[in-house]
Amino acid sequence: MTKAAIEGTVDLSRQVYDQMVAHARSDFPYEVCGMVAGTGGRFDRHYEIPNAERSMTFYKMDGKAHLKAITEIEDNDWEFGIYHSHTHTEAFPSVTDVELAVYPEAVYLIVSLQDPEPVIRAFDIRDGRITERVLTVDGEQAPAGNR
């Protein structure tokens, strides 16, 4: 897998950023997953979705919770992102992550807990091609360790 090119900006509200990190830590060493939503490239809504697989290396969104979130997102015509955690690897899409990226319009976010300070990175994944986005929190550069 090649290094991602960097394009575009994704802005998380501080609350959503903190909720994603807390969620990732909440079931360590298992991967967690969820969705974020908003408008204009800014995500200010958070959906914690159970990982139906409860695995250390894989995630599968619980169907009922995923349907509820995606219905609300579509009903409001919001942009959305899908996130999950990597508990022991960097915040970069794995081969499996790329294969499971079925929403070309979504931003894919990965929360890495590999190091003491969590790292979140954002990507577009389309037709197997990974493009990294610049991540900001409340319009400011994301915390140290994030790209």
Image (spheres, rainbow, N blue to C red):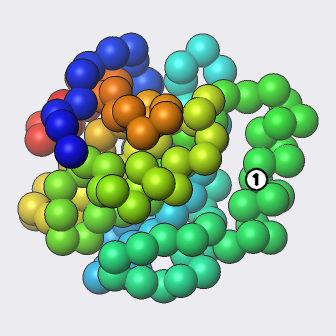
Task: Please tell me which residue lies in front, 22 or 84.
Answer: 84
Percent position of residue 86, x then y = 29, 64
Q: Position of residue 29 (x, y in %)?
A: 29, 82
Vertical position of residue 77 compared to residue 91: above or below: above
- Count of all numbered marks drawn on residues in the image: 1
In which quadrant is the C terminus drawn? top left
51 displayed left or right of 130: right
Query: Vertical placement of 106 versus 64: above or below?
Result: above
Instruction: Return the residue nearer the eye: 71 or 103.
Output: 103
Q: Is residue 52 left or right of residue 143?
A: right
Query: In what quadrant of the picture does the N terminus appear?
Result: top left
| Nearest to the observer: residue 126 or residue 23 | 126
Residue at image coords 42%, 74%? 58
Query: Is there any visible trace of residue 37 in the rendered image?
Result: yes
Please name the residue shown 52% across and 48% down the image. Answer: 101
Residue 46 rendering spot, x and y as whole percentages: 60, 48
Q: Is residue 41 left or right of residue 18?
A: right
- Neighbor class of circle 1 (other Cα within 10 Å; few <14, some 14-19, many 20+) is many
SS of the residue under disc 1: helix
Task: Tell me which corner region of the image, top left, top right, bottom left or bottom right, holds residue 37.
Answer: top right
Residue at the spot x=52%, y=56% of the render? 100
Q: Quadrant of residue 142?
A: top left
- Tell me the residue at 49%/35% (across/down): 127
Q: Is residue 63 above or below residue 77?
A: below
Q: Is residue 137 visible?
A: no
Query: Which residue is label 1 attached to?
Result: 69
Residue 102 x/y as whole percent: 60, 47
